[in-house]
Amino acid sequence: MRKFASFFLIAFLMASSVIAQDTAEKKKTTKGHIDQNKFRQLKDVLATPNDQRTASGAPGHAYTQQKVDYVMDLRLDEAKNMLYGNEKITYHNNSNDNLEYLWVQLDQNMRAPDSKTPLVESKGMSSFQTPDAFVKENMAKPKQFGFNIEEVKQADGKDLSYTINRTMMRINLPKALAPGQVFKFSIKWNYLINNSVEDGGRSGFEAFPDGNKNYTIAQFFPRLAVYNNVEGWQNMQFWGRSEWALEFGDYDVKLTVPADHIVDATGELQNEKEVLTKEQRNRWEKARKSYKDPVFIVTQEEAEANEKEGTTKTKTWHFKANNVRDYAFASSRKYIWDAMAVNINGNTVMAVSLYPKEGNPLWEEHSTRVVANTLEEYSKLTFDYPYSKAISVHAKRQGMEYPMICFNYGRPNPDGTYSDRVKNGMIGVITHEIGHNFFPMIVNSDERQWTWMDEGLNSFVEILAELDYDPSFNTGNLPKDIVRYMSLDQENLSPIMSQGDYVYNFGPNAYTKPAAGLYMLRQTIMGPELFDYAFRTYSKRWMFKHPTPADFFRTMEDASGMDLDWFWRGWFYTTDYNDIGIKEVKPVYLTDKPNERTKKLQEQYPAYFSRLGKLVFLTTKKEDANAKDVEEFISKLPADQKENMKEIPKYIYQVEFEKPGGLVLPIIVELTYADGSKTRETFPAQIWRKNDSQVYRVFTSNKEIKSIVVDPDLETADIDTSNNSWPKETSTKFDKFKNTVKD
């Protein structure tokens, strides 16, 4: 031990002596610096752990969250496209704080005539437009969308003071609501439903040429905002993009609709005998036992007959849902309805689809089966799906998610034909939106603040579920697909850790880049076993709770035993890119001749070198190659040591790796030998910890190395592969194009 210590001491002194002469001068001209090493911990960024959110990423012993219960009576007026509602709200203050007021979200006000949303976009005039577009954009009168709040009352019927600030309403409490107390009040409201095809929107209705409509309704009622120890009240305005932060609660909902409509919604149907025929109930029971194929509750023939009749009568559907964070429903006389059972670890969950004939044959072939597959695969990677059903509803231009129900696009041509693109688009959107039941409907992150926590995580798991449904499914090619985005000019990039309303290129930033990062963690950095355990731990820890990014980052490290702060810091908090390449490869040979630099060191430190004794030297000059000293040394070793030794390597290569990019990531190296065989070596990202621009590695072999490639499978989103190969590729893009052309 002492020998090694003295060796390093002398080596340090040798290095120090080179710089000692100008140290004094440098002290005068240079300043100190803060730690900018890319492997420094995230303690300067993440919130300080506390008794509600622990340093391990788990909820603390003092974790609390609010609860909000709703009892709603709703009426859909199909003739006027109006929705009328009366809701009774019970707010449970489970926090340790006295609340002076409550904040309620009024999302429909985003499209009200006085909405500020259209005014926040920079907008010039095009040099040409269609007459239709010009009239709509410049001459159309604003439609009377937005909530009409008829009354807000206390439980005793007295008026309750409130203030509306665009998409937020403050309920001014008569007195502060103390910890542990409950406050009950009611809101009566109505609004004009938007045509989601013409007016846009995440919910609304589609009008068909025959006069029938498909209502897919969400964000339809005043909903309580989240109050917690991280944001206080999450009362950021809704501008239309960043979604929602919501509390869990119990819902009791009665929906009055035209009597010939088929309805499904978040929750359990309470009055089957009143709204379903005996035949429909029998078919539903059959579906509950069908784990292989969907069963029709309403066939296409029955739906087509139903949509031709029409009625002025109404029917009330009654649903109850416990421990959900939101509510949505779908209603139409056009619906075909099918369902099948899914076995989730011994519990039966119903996979359900509602769609008009315009969705067939595509929807009856795939929709419910995709729902079932998604529930199975997400449950394997996270936790057992806890609700009793999941519904996929066909909507022409929507892809939106809510507890137990989602609205999805994917429509064949009028003659029933469809392309693979349309089919895969439908399968993809159903998988994605059903997957949102897990993130954020159950793992209830703040979508208004951190879009990536639901969209990014969900997009990652979606890939695995799609491949299980169809192994040949085109999921894209992550992380390669994110390269183009990460190569953009920095003015067009934002860190993932940006509030959703203020990011450029929203799709890549919130969906693809986070998903690519997680894919890279699983496949390249952590490995599936460590990643899957940690990801499942995070999912289970934060079921029916409100996680933050810090909770995710900390749990992934806590459950895997890996320090990933360098990855979170680079991939999530910066817009740095990855570019790792090979700068130089030098063949090296054993020799008995020291080079000039070594001779000078021997002359400068004779005592040190005399203690080392006989030395073996390395050279880049092939003519000086001579391994006799190593051979002589080995010949004198005991037989048992010789048996455990490899042959003296015939080929030695020193490789200098460079890193023009800002990210630190593993170096994946593939060596190809003269005989065509290949080997791979992965050097952890920590290889860059002491030098952020260049590192060296030595490769030894008894076979000549013909080529070396960095990141051969494009696993690390390297934006410039021109420096990834040795010898450098000399073929042009045109040469590669020619090679792809078949005779």
Image (tube, rainbow, N blue to C red):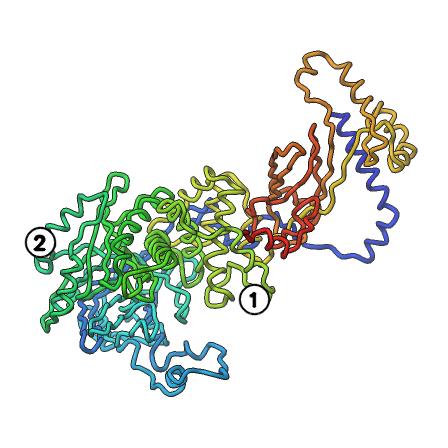
How far across and how far down the image is residue 275, in percent?
11, 60
Question: Image quadrant of residue 432?
Answer: bottom left
How far across and how far down the image is residue 479, in percent?
52, 51
Question: Image quadrant of residue 76?
Answer: bottom left
Answer yes or no: is residue 633 visible.
yes
Q: Look at the picture and state if 516 lies above or below 225.
A: above
Going by the numbered disc 1, the residue's amino acid type is Asn
Secondary structure of the residue carrying tag 2 is helix
- Front residue (pair 58, 382): 382
Q: Find disc 2 in the rendering and name its residue.
A: 279
- Front residue (pair 452, 147): 452
How far across and how far down the image is residue 709, in percent?
64, 43
Residue depicted at x 19% and y 65%: 334
Give the class, few, some or many, for how many residues have Cα within 10 Å of label 1's Cα (few <14, many ≥20). few
Answer yes or no: is residue 125 visible.
no
* Nearer mark to the viewer, of 2 and 1: 2
Q: Classify residue 72 as left or right of residue 626.
A: left
- Front residue (pair 485, 685): 485
Check the image and name the residue furthest to the front.
743
Q: CA distance from mark 2 to mark 1?
A: 58 Å
Secondary structure of the residue carrying tag 1 is helix
Going by the numbered disc 2, the residue's amino acid type is Glu
Residue depicted at x 48% and y 54%: 514
Q: Find disc 1 in the rendering and name its residue.
A: 492
How far across and how far down the image is residue 559, in percent?
46, 40
Q: Look at the picture and state if 635 lies above or below 428.
A: above
Q: Earlier in the sequence, mark 2 or mark 1?
A: 2
